[in-house]
Image (spheres, grey):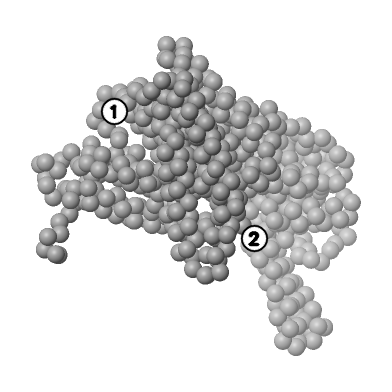
Amino acid sequence: MAGDFHITPALSDALTILGAAGIVIPAFARLRINPVIGFILVGIVAGPFGLGALTGRYPWLEAVSITDPTGIEPFAEFGIVLLLFTIGLELSFRRLVAMRKMVFGIGAAEMIGAATLIGGFLLAIQWPTQSALWLSLALAMSSTALVLPISGTQSPVGRAALSMLLFEDLALVPMLFLIGATAGAATSEVGESLSRIALYGSLAVVGILVIGRFILPTLFAQAARSKKPELFLAISLLVVILAATVTASVGLSPILGALIAGLVIAETDYRNEVELVVEPFKGLALGIFLITVGMRIDIGALVDDWLALIGALAGVLVVKSIVTAALLRLAGARPGVAAETGVLMSSPSETTLIVLGAAGAASILRQDTVAFWSAATAIGLTLTPVLAGLGRLAGRGVDRRHLETMEAEAVPDRTIIFGFGRVGRVVADMLQEHGRPYLAIDSDIDGFTDARSRGYSVMFGDVSRRELLDRLDLGKAKAVVLTMDDPVLTARLARRLRETHPALPIIARARDTHHAARLYKAGVTDAVPEAMEASLQLSEAVLVDIGVAMGPVIASIHEKRSELRAEIMKDGDLDVEPSLGRRRLRDVRSG
């Protein structure tokens, strides 16, 4: 009966978690902030060490807090299972084959290198070998769920990060296998149990892969014929549950089964449809998992160990940054890409927490060790967006120092283009079309990198620095083109160039006629007001398209341009009328 219904503490905790996930995901998405921070904070605030600890004094807090951590363990396991399933969906044998050199080269070297340094330090301070091994491997992993949304997969940083993250996700399979086998061996004769679990576990994994290869396409084909998306979801969840049950029954972790289930489905032709129907659960699964992570963090207890906690996390960040950046540089990556990727990938991962939990359950790591490093990992995950920003700044700084040391070879009669945005590229294209040498200078590292990759002759540098102008040997230049979208810098640079090179042709991009007047006064040979020229061309097109004869249109355009020339001449107090499209046989000099 309805009157007998009451909310149990477990149900209250479940509603708190689901409600928090429902609030955090859209709220942080609207703010364009990764929700990881929000989920962890919800777990800290609402957890048993936050508001949950105050329910005895304030009973009304039970509605918005989590008081029974053990009661919500099924939710944590559910979140982990779904998270590993979605990671499996992102993997596929085809993708691994296409990226095999980067994945099994740089990816393997990065994880093994970072784990070796961390593990070596732990052994040096007398840690047990097995504990040092698994903790170092766990800390060497980076966050797929956070890094890829930040970096993307198309940029140089994103491609490098993807290759390393793919290897780590793939390495999670044997890691969980071995941890699960160790856990089973701890409760019986070690050698015999480990062999039995390894044998049965291998058979179970092979069985899942084989059965999935032949059975799943038929099931998904039937779902496709019914045109009911919920059938794809039902089949996917069934596969996850069965795979997790099978691996758990042979002594392995159920989350290993979920990962393999995702990998199996990723090999079918229905992968994209499954990803679509599972996508809403992906964020929820990660949210539930991270909330339970936050619940384990006792801020009060960490206050006493905050120096050790910050020091340990900082050590991991430094080691992983150096290893990642060094390996990418050895592989030929640009210094800025190596630096940015190193800092971005330095934080531990959500899979670190999974490995820590599995190692703790297998009695490989003590519970206080798991709690300490779980807290450090949670802080690292929270800092990942900040690390991404710092990495971007570090990458640009490294590239700037590296590229500004490049020698600018003086080529006689070349045109120098300052600024290489859309306008500068068009000028370069036209110079190339007529076989004229040029060199472009740009201070935007992303624009510089893209232009270099497209074959343009471009040099990185800050045009406001006098040393750069001296190195360019502008006395041998045919002309200088100023295309920067900075009116103050353009005028200042024009004045400086005219003082040092009186006969040098200087052609500048102007915003409007007033800006053009200032540039003529500063000493440019020609100033082209982009707004005015675009307006005249637009007017010409309109007049012709509505039926006005071409002759009167051209005459009116010339007349309008003459009016604008007079306006510029007056505003700039010029002695010579500017061209604005009308070429002269003599040089135009400003007054």
Residue at the spot of label 1 = 302
- Residue at 26 percent of width and 24 percent of height: 304
Q: Quadrant of the C terminus?
A: bottom right
Mark 1 closeness class: few <14, some 14–19, many ≥20 residues within 10 Å: some
x%, y% of residue 480? 77, 48
At horizontal 29% and vertical 54% (from top left) the residue drawn is: 19
201 or 259: nearer the eye? 201
The image quarter in which residue 186 lies: top left
- Name the residue at 19% across, 48% down: 9
Is 335 on the left or on the right of 203, as rendered?
A: right
Of 9 and 184, the residue lying toward us: 184
Disc 2 residue type? Answer: Arg
Q: Secondary structure at mark 2?
A: loop
Asked whether, in this view, residue 223 is left or right of residue 484, the answer is left
Q: Residue at x 67, y 38 (%)?
A: 100
Is 59 above or below relative to 576?
above
Residue 570 appears in the picture as rendered: no
- Mark closer to the chain start, 2 or 1: 1
Kind of residue indicated by mark 1: Leu
Give the CA separation, mark 2 to mark 1.
Answer: 57 Å
- The label on residue 202 is none
**Quadrant placement of the N terminus:** bottom left
Q: Disc 2 designates what residue?
A: 511
